[in-house]
Amino acid sequence: MRFKATLENYVFVLPAVLIFLIFYVIPFIWVFQLGLFDWDGILPTKTFVGLDNFKEIFFQDKIWWQSMLNAGWITFIALTLQNAVAFLLAMACNREIKLKHFYRLIFFIPPVLSEVVVGLVWQWILDGNYGLLNGWLVQLGLPNLVRNWLSDPNTALTTVAIVHSWKGFGWGFLIFLAGLQTIPREFYEAARVDGANAWDSFRKITIPLMVPVAVLVAILTVLGTMQAFVLITAMTGGGPAYHTQVPVLRILASMRGSSRFGYACAQGINFGLILMAISFIQYRFSRKARNT
Amino acid sequence: MRTIAYYKSKKIAVNAIIHLLLIAVTITCLFPLFWMVSSSLKTQETIFKDMSLIPKEFHFENYILAWREGGFGRYFLNSILYTVSVVAGIIIIASLAAYAFSRLRFPGKNFLFFMFMAAMMIPIPGSFVPLYVLLSKLHLRNTALGYILCMVNVGLSTSIFLLKTFFDKLPLELEDAARMDGCSKLGIWWHVALPLAKPVLAVVVVFNALNVWNEYVLALIIFDNKNLMPLQRALMMFRGEFLTDYPLLMAGLTITALPIIIVYLLMQKYIVKGVTSGALFG
């Protein structure tokens, strides 16, 4: 009886476990296996090359590390500009202010749109010859600001980063707002009774209580932004000349462009480990910050 | 002593500045969408010269052209098919598993649950490479089933987590009563647990639906066959083939974005809940 009952219980998790084993665990193991081989993805024979793929990544693949720096720059803008805007807007909407639900509704529209839609619409607005932005700059009498925003090596990466921030700030905004709403009003009232002004209560109450929330937002921003690439595909395709390449685009290029499946897996492992290291450091750093 | 009037006018001034900021951001959020719709109503001849925000004539036929000749009708139906199948699959499979993890006893339970949770934490950025190999071997590339199964897997871990957390907080009395009445375990899951889980199921449905509708990477590596492509993949394809046909591209983008915006406006309560519960992050 008991055996039958246990068997019956397994039936509940069986579909989930099967799908998970086939589509998550097997690919997970294969990444590590394939990373040690040279393989074009078609021929039945794979050549074992040991750690050669990793050596190539570390010592020869300059574009790979350039793409890592590019993703780092986009992440830097997301951490500063995007999250500052998110926090500022959350502060504004945390007041007794009319229409705050309407604003909240609107600010989360960019995050629910797909990266393809956002990328292609902004690409059209920023188009060097026929784009609206350049059209406006000319009309405003600022023709020397006109740029080929997405095909000029000087502006492409930062332009992409700003569009990424436009799409992403709604996430941070919602999380910051939820965090601010958990701070009891009494804290501020007590501070005011003690003669504190708005700046004092912001510095002494809001900031310390929001540190854990800010750390959460920062970790999510880093993990999300470092891996973002669909928006970039839609806007620049990684160009001009590798200036907006990011790691995941390189992995795709290794696989689909040069048919080097083993190398693509090695790049994936390398990037995955870097991401885990970054979030681990952030986590440790945040615990230290909270304890002092 | 400052007067009440002073504080009142100060408050009004501060609020006015804040509203100005919030309205500016609101316009920044909405304007690209407005421009997308506006561009979709212009013609190939006028779109490169005419920068007017509201087109002089509305060429709604662009939408018919995009739907028929552009193939977006077909891609739209594909996206609907994938979204509905994946969401239905996730609801059944994830809630069965979550119910078992919360209520039933079997050896290895904690280990299995831990596995699902670990999958949420560990990023494997290159996993689409072996996935491509696997699907080729299983003859699931270029099939709707292959894509649907992959997408079910993508949403499984977070959905199980959300549902298990909910079931854990549910009082046992109702289920005990059903058991007394001779209800089987499967019957309790279907007749008692699932109906009670409606609020959290709504969160699971909305998030997974958005996720599937907006998905691009797996659609890129799985589909070469145009007839099976979902909207996101088809849009990039269309852009590659008809580089400068902006009116039709913008019509295609509007067709893709509109359902998402409608669903968002109707279900925004559940989206806010999902984001702020801190569990779901794309």
Image: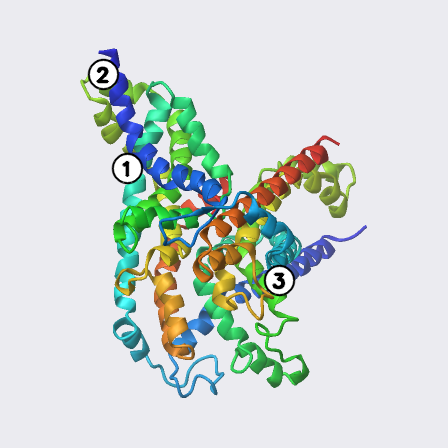
Q: Amino acid at mark 3?
A: Leu
Separation of disc 3 and disc 2 at Cα?
64 Å
Q: Amino acid at mark 1?
A: Ile
**Horizontal arrangement in the rendering, residue A69 relative to residue B72 (left or right):** right
Placement of B181 over or under B10, stated as above or below: above
Disc number placed over residue B92 in the picture, else none: 1
Q: Earlier in the sequence, mark 3 or mark 1?
A: 3
Q: Position of residue B19 (x, y in %)?
A: 60, 61
Q: Are marks 3 and 2 in contact (CB under 8 Å)?
A: no
Q: Position of residue A150 (x, y in %)?
A: 57, 72
Tag 2 residue: A4
Chain containing mark 2: A
> Local crowd at mark 2 within 10 Å, few (<14), some, or many (≥20)?
few
Tag 3 residue: B21
Placement of B160 over or under B178, stated as above or below: below
> Local crowd at mark 3 within 10 Å, few (<14), some, or many (≥20)?
some
**Secondary structure type for disc 3:** helix
Q: Quadrant of the C terminus of chain A?
A: top right
Q: Judge whether residue B186 can be spotted in this image.
A: yes
Q: Position of residue B263 (x, y in %)?
A: 36, 55
> Local crowd at mark 1 within 10 Å, few (<14), some, or many (≥20)?
some
Pick the residue in front: A25 or B47.
Answer: A25
At horizontal 31% and vertical 29% (from top left) the residue drawn is A13
**Secondary structure type for disc 2:** helix
Task: Please state which of the two labelled residues, at mark 3 or mark 1, is closer to the viewer.
Answer: 1
Give the image quarter of residue B80: bottom left
**Secondary structure type for disc 1:** helix
Task: Please state which of the two labelled residues, at mark 3 or mark 2, is closer to the viewer.
Answer: 2
